[in-house]
Image: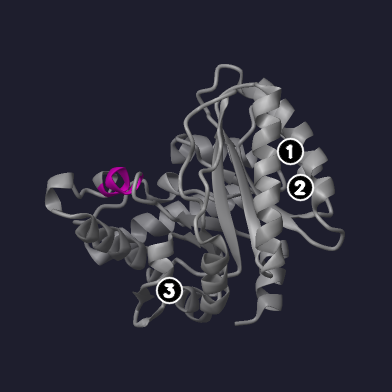
Amino acid sequence: MSRDAMTRQMQTGQGFIAALDQSGGSTPKALRLYGIAEDAYGSEAEMFDLIHAMRARIATAPGFTGDKVIGAILFEMTMDREIADKPAARYLWEEKRVVPFLKIDKGLEAAANGVQMLKPIPGLDTLLDRAVAQGIFGTKERSVILGADAGGIGAIVDQQIDLGLKVLAKGLIPILEPEVDINAPDKAAAEEMLLAALLAGLDGVPDGQQVMLKLTIPDQPGHYAPLTAHPKVMRVVALSGGYSRDDACARLAANPGMIASFSRALTEGLSADQSDAAFNAALGQAIDAIHAASVC
């Protein structure tokens, strides 16, 4: 798989990144929203079979192509499975021209100093080597900012940058995701602190290399413009963070240079009991709306 072609697509592609990386903690909710209640499966293995079937249905839909969906973030179990009889990452790139990423974080520490740091990632080197072997282009790692605490935000950015450098050393592109909780009472102030911390942290990225950033859509439109223009930033993508699709798209459209990387907002309105025609139509409408907001 051509990494040069993937890099060009991520740098200049006119579209968005689909977040298909629900993990063990978020999968039951994702399945409920998809119309599958928790009493429909009796084990974690069955749960992951059902969420993989949902992801495969999305990935194989006619409208899910690199024309509008330029990348997709996968859960580790998705990377290890097949879609349409091909390894998932190969299917996405070879059949759909969608650049594959891998979620590598293992959850969050308890809240302290207004943030939730990343938990340790056991076997990180091995996981990154497996990702390279599978044709993965980059990684994603999420931590959470709960309020405007400069010390906590500085620590979270330092941790993200440190992990990003380990990912870069493997030849992969990290998506650093210090999410600001949309319900934070001082969200705008937290975003001011985050911007300053990220601009300082990017000094630690070697010249000639780039990272990506996945950020909550800011309260102040254009707030992250210094990051979208930064030479060490390949792309700034936006998480929906609990906003409805319409609200997330409206907020995103007010931030030129940012593109979507939505999860729940992408799957909103999809249901396991829909016919293929109804499912594909609903997904196509979601893709069109998110694409339009991303290229506005």
Residue, disc 1? 224
How many angstroms separate mark 2 from mark 1 (CA)? 7 Å
Is 231 on the left or on the right of 282, as rendered? right
Depth check, mark 1 against mark 3: the one in front is: 3
Residue, disc 2? 228
Q: Is residue 212 above or below residue 180?
A: below
- Quadrant hosting residue 62: bottom left
Name the spot of residue 290 as percent of width and height, x first.
52, 50
Q: Does any portion of residue 69 appear in the rendered image? A: no
Looking at the image, which residue is at 73% across and 27% down?
193
Give amino acid for label 2.
Thr
User: What's the magenta region?
Assistant: 26-31
**First in residue order: circle 1 vs circle 3:** 3
Q: Is residue 121 above or below residue 173?
A: above
Name the spot of residue 266 as percent of width and height, x first.
43, 50
Looking at the image, which residue is at 47% across and 31% down?
110
Residue, disc 3? 88
In the image, 91 versus 291, the foreground residue is 91
Looking at the image, which residue is at 61% across and 50% down?
294
Name the spot of residue 261 as percent of width and height, x first.
54, 51
Q: Is residue 245 above or below residue 291?
A: above
* Residue sticking out furthest to the top: 185
